[in-house]
Amino acid sequence: MRIRSSEITPEHVYRSRSRRQFLKAGMLAAGSALLAACGPRSTPAPTPAAAGASPAPGGPAAGLTDELGDPATPFDVVTNYNNYYEFTTDKAGVAPLARDFQTDPWTVEVGGLVRNPQTFGLEDLLKAFPTEDRLYRLRCVEGWSMVVPWQGFSLADLLQRVEPTADARYVAFTALFAPDRLPGQSSPWYDWPYSEGLRIDEALNPLTTLATGVYGQPLPPQNGAPVRLVVPWKYGFKSIKAIVRIDLVAEQPKTLWNTAAPQEYGFYSNVNPAVDHPRWSQATERRLGDLGRRKTLPFNGYADQVAGLYAGMDLRANY
Ligand SMILES: Nc1nc2c(c(=O)[nH]1)N[C@H]1C(S)=C(S)[C@@H](COP(=O)(O)O)O[C@H]1N2
Ligand SMILES: [Mo]
């Protein structure tokens, strides 16, 4: 069996395994991709949600299309094909492993270079920041993508509330560290907990979202419950799940992927079809559910809203 380059996936695999195991993993990945996209439904049907947002389980997402005319990826795919290394590197295996993950109670501490540090319980977040429907493309660095109907609010609203000081230049995000509940955190390959970062102007862009729901219901554990970041113009790994800390900082923060493989995953990680990953092209992507590949758009199709953030920067050097 020949492995199509479209199915070459987990970033971690080549680092730790022999070539034979790599090929085997590739075939497994190919199998689970098919299963997620076309296979029988393996989870209970979602509860009815707000009108319009409720999907026909397993079917097309009731007429929901993004501003490019692309249909929303079906609920079953969004919630059964996941990257979440705290559980497993097997995308189809995350949902079953995460099913009983407890996310209540949950707090998010927001601090660092701010005048008004605050700890929010999840209920506080939901009360303070009304959520809205946000249908965004998510483009994974591995070369697949989907269109996800999130519910969330702009991170900028939260940051304004804590009053960043003038020397706050970056925002650092930290996910939950709980090896007893997150089996993947026994992997020595990664610098746990999962961490990410943005420049403060990126963090303040209205597209940058804290999501608490998907398809009109609370985020399921596999999608990053109870609160995760969504940065639609950057590769998916920037969209950190299960956030427990947000810190305003002066220096560019370290991030899990940049620490693991700096030559492959830069701090910026803007979707850029002109800059290939060292091990594969980024020119095209496979939209989950499609057979062929499509061209990847600069900034994942959000250039008109974010390209200005990078005026004068060399986007090859700042990958
Ligand atoms: N905490 C945490 N956040 C994470 C990841 C992860 O492994 N752990 N994977 C990232 C990657 S690589 C992608 S593509 C997206 C996938 O989000 P989804 O499963 O909701 O589609 O989550 C990102 N956020
Ligand atoms: Mo990803």
Image: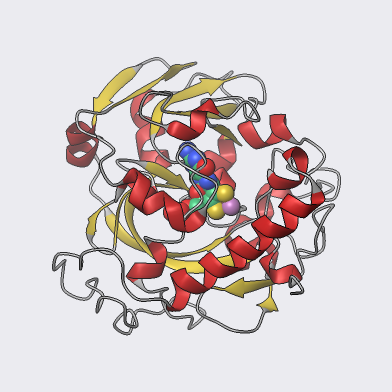
| Residue 11 seen by the camera | yes
List x then y, in percent, for residue 82: 47, 55
* Residue ID at (53%, 57%): 232
Comparing 290 with 275, the one in front is 290
Left or right of residue 131: residue 109: right
What colour scheme was applied to this rendering of the protein? secondary structure
> In the picture, which quadrant includes the N terminus?
bottom right
Above or below: residue 277 compared with residue 163:
below
Left or right of residue 187: residue 298: right
* Residue ID at (58%, 30%): 187
List x then y, in percent, for residue 234: 61, 52
Comparing 136 with 4, the one in front is 4
Above or below: residue 144 compared with residue 189:
below
List x then y, in percent, for residue 144: 60, 66
How many numbered marks are there?
0
| Residue 207 seen by the camera | no
List x then y, in percent, for residue 59: 32, 82
| Corner quadrant of residue 284 | bottom right
* Residue ID at (40%, 64%): 78
Left or right of residue 307: residue 135: left
| Corner quadrant of residue 300 | bottom right
